[in-house]
Image: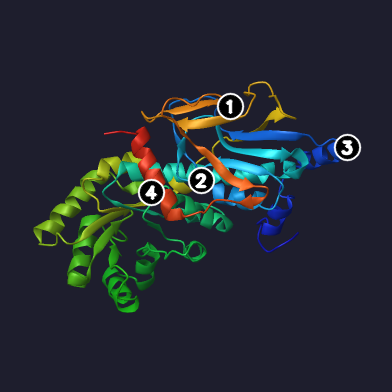
Amino acid sequence: MSGRFDAIPEAAVRDGTATDAYFLRTEETLERADRNPTVVAEITRDQFPTGEFDLLAGVKDAARLLEDLPVDVDAIREGRLFDGGPVLRIEGEYLDFARYETSLLGFLSHQSAIATAALEACRAAPDASVLSFGARHVHPSLAGVVERGALLGGLDGFSHVAAGELLGREAGGTMPHALVIAFGDQETAWEAFDDAVAPEVPRIAIADTFSDEKDESLRAAATLGDALDGVRLDTTGSRRGDFRHIVREVRWELDARGREDVDIFVSGGLGPTELRELRDLVDGFGVGGYVSNADPLDFALDIVELDGEPVSKRGKLSGVKQAFRTPDGGHHVGLADRADPEGGDPLLEPLIRDGEIVREFDLDAATERAREDADAVGFREQA
C-alpha cells in the first residue's frame, strides 16, 4: 500500500485494515477460541447530559462503512444536536464489525467537531455571509470532510475547488495578496482581475497589501467604480491593531464617498468571539482554522449488551439506551426498553437493517435540521 502522498486509500478503509492493530489481534484470538458473541455496541461522547450540545455529522460515511455487513444500526440523524448518551448503536455478531471501530470513530469524531464549530460561527454572525477558508490547514485528502462539515453546520460556502467537485457545490472566494504582489501594484492587479474572471464572479478586492486598509479600499473603489462589489481586509493579526476601529474607518470613508454599495469582508484568524465583535459592521466573514482545526470529539465505542444481557466496562453504562429531545429543548438519556420521557422525541432511528442502508442523506436537509435544533436547544446562546 504505497502512493505519492501519505493518504490511506479508500480500499483500506473498506476492508478494515485502516484500523488499530489490537482489533486484528482480537479477531485472531476470538476466532481461535471459536467465540463470536452477539453484542450491542454504542458510540457515545458523554454518558450523561452536561448541558453542552454538539452537532452530529459523519453519519453518511459511517453508514457507507457498515453497509453490506450483517448488522442492524440505529443512529441520530445528521444535523441534530446531542448531549450525552449514544449517537449510534450497532447490533450483531462482534466479529462482523470489530475491525471497523477505528474508522467509524474517526468519521464521527472529526466531522462532528467541524460541523459544531461551523454552527458556532454561524450563530455568532447570523445576518452575515460566513465562508469556510480552512482547507489549507488540513491534509488535502480531508478537504471534502472539512467543507461538508462546514456546510452542514450552516456556513454559506467554501473556497476549495476539489471539495466543490466532490460535493456538487461551486467553490467561491476573492483574490489573494499574491495576485497584487505579482503585478507589483494594487490598481493593475484589480483591473487585471476584473478583466479576466467571469462576469458572475463578485469583484471583491483584497485591500491591505502594501498600504493601510482605508487607503486601499478607497483606491479599489476609484479603480473599479460601480464594478466593485466589496473589499476584503485580511491583514495579519500582528499588524492589525484594533480591527473593529479599522473596519469602522473603512465603512465611514466608503460611505462618505457615496459607496454604501461596497460590502466589507474580513478574514484571518477569526472565530465566534471576533464575529460577534464585528457582525454589526461586516457583510461577510472568511473563517479558517477555527472550523477546520476543531479538536475531534472524544467518541468511544463500547459493548453494552452481551448475548442479551447488560454489560459494561468500568466507567460506562450497561444496557441498550435511547436519547430523546424533550419538549423544553433538553436532552434525556434512558434505557431503550423503559417508558419515554413525556413528550420526548426519540433521536436514534434506523440507519441500517441487515446490512442495507434505510435512510437518505440530504446535506441541505441536515443543515436545516441543525438550524432548527440549535434554536430548540438554545445552542451557544450569547448576546
Secondary structure, mark 4, is: helix
Q: Name the mark nearer the viewer: 1 or 4.
A: 1
Calculate the distance from the C-alpha at mark 3 to the C-alpha at mark 4: 48 Å
Which amino acid is tagged 2? Ala
* Figure check: 364 above or below 278: below
Q: Give how far across and how far down residue 182 sits, in percent.
A: 39, 71
Which circle, 1 or 3, is nearer the viewer?
A: 1
Q: Which residue is outermost to the right? A: 32
Q: What amino acid is labelled 1 in the image?
A: Asp
Residue position for label 1 = 337
Residue position for label 2: 57
Task: State the quadrant of the N terminus.
Answer: bottom right
Q: Is residue 7 left or right of residue 307?
A: left
Near-viewer residue (340 or 28): 340
Q: Quadrant of the C terminus?
A: top left
Q: Nearer the viewer, residue 50 or 137?
A: 50
Which numbered disc, 1 or 2, marks the residue that appears first in the sequence? 2
Distance Cα–Cα, label 2 vs label 4: 13 Å
> Which residue is at a point 36% across and 46% down the rendered structure image?
237
* Residue nearer the viewer, 357 or 371: 357
